[in-house]
Amino acid sequence: MSGVGAERTQEIADRVERFVRDVVVPFERDPRRDHHDCPKDELVTELRELARAAGVLTPHILADGSHLSQSETAIVLAKTGLSPLGPLACNTAAPDEGNMYLLGKIGSPEIKERFLKPLVAGRARSAFFMTEPAEEGGAGSDPSMMTTTCRPDGNQWVVNGRKAFITGARGAEVGIVMAKAEEGACMFLVDLPDPAITIDHVPNTIDSSMPGGHAVVTIRNLRIPADQMLGHPGEGFKYAQIRLAPARLSHCMRWLGACIRANEIATKYANRRQAFGKTLIDHEGVGFMLADNLIDLKQAELMISWCASVLDTGSLGTNESSMAKVAVSEALMRVADRCVQVMGGTGVTNETIVEQVFREVRAFRIYDGPTEVHKWSLAKKIKRDWQKANS
């Protein structure tokens, strides 16, 4: 990172951190939550207006529309993650952040004006319709299993299928829909809500930081103008790859921030709580857990930085992002678990965000590909490389 770039990035990150710690954190006990304790859009809107006033809304996208590098984004997004509400307030949350990145890279001028602009402005939320119900044999970690279909009809495409775990579908105004045509996967932009897309069910999940939850939806004869397709028929998976590695890494960035904060809370607790004649930090078992947290947090930070630097070369970073996703999610799970353990009974209550961070990071080990899928992908590369070297 150049000197000028580093200075600019640090200034943005410092402003974001002050905003999240001073303004957002007090909202963590705000009662505006749905039945599953997810923030309601009313709360998100208020937080975004505060972020707008503070000049930290969508901080990774500059006023001229240019995007911070991945290395710069890593520093800023970790600061937004210092509160579970921080990414929502600053407009760096999934799936919006990844969708903005994708549309900024490949959207036509018309698509950028109509769909990207309100996302960057924080005036709309988006949803990415790819995953399908497991009980129906639909696509999950294996996108080739996609059963949702699309067919051309004049100057429109007609989409039918079922989707599951569609984050933020309830309340979203912009949708990216993936479906399968004869030529292969296709990706479309749609306005939401649309009567052809019905929300069947929003299951309760272990995490509770995403407005709108993770919906199961049915798509019946959804008609989409041909000019709302990204690229050409059959190019959907190619565009998904453009979004994939940066989105994986963004999860790592945000949850690194969350675990830094959880560790701060656990450290404060351990330095104040007395047991067996001395503070908890003076008991070797507790002190060693907090020491291990520092090690895991630093390793996670360095893995994110390394992968970001690879992406900044223009590489898709598929293998590197798989390694980072595994290493960071597993390290942060250990950190979150130790924070709960250090705090004992207090750690399993909602008196602090530690309990929520633990739940969210547990889900993160599955989101954007579970550990096992990434390791399997890396093992295939190891085999290919060995066969090539020994052929």
Image (cartoon, rainbow, N blue to C red):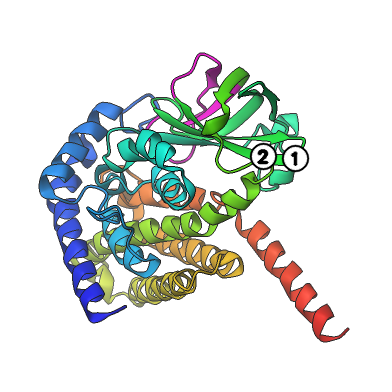
Q: Is residue 205 magenta?
A: yes
Q: Which residues are magenta?
A: 192-218
From the viewer's perspective, is 203 left or right of 288?
right
230 vs 333, nearest the viewer? 230
187 vs 75, nearest the viewer? 187
- Is 135 located above or below residue 23 in the figure? above
Dominant secondary structure, magenta: loop
- Is 201 located above or below residue 362 in the figure? above
Question: Tags 2 and 1 in contact by the CB under 8 Å rule?
Answer: yes
Residue type at mark 2: give it: Pro
Query: Residue placed at 25% from the left, 56% from the top?
Result: 62
Marker disc for residue 183:
1
Q: Is residue 294 magenta?
A: no
Q: At which x and y percent is residue 253?
A: 38, 61
Residue type at mark 1: give it: Glu
SS class of the residue under badge 2?
Answer: loop
Query: Residue placed at 26% from the left, 59% from the top?
Result: 79
Q: Residue 7, located in which quarter of the rendered image?
A: bottom left
- Is 364 located above or below residue 223 in the figure? below
Residue 131 in view of the camera: yes
The residue identified by callout 2 is 233
Residue 208 in view of the camera: no
Distance from the alpha carbon under mark 2 to that under mark 1: 6 Å
From the viewer's perspective, is 34 left or right of 196?
left
Q: In what quadrant of the picture does the N terminus appear?
A: bottom left
Q: At which x and y percent is residue 231?
A: 58, 43
From the viewer's perspective, is 220 left or right of 300?
right
Q: At which x and y percent is residue 171?
A: 38, 25
- Dot 2 alpha-carbon crowd within 10 angstroms: few under 14, some 14 to 19, many 20 or more: many
SS class of the residue under badge 1?
Answer: loop
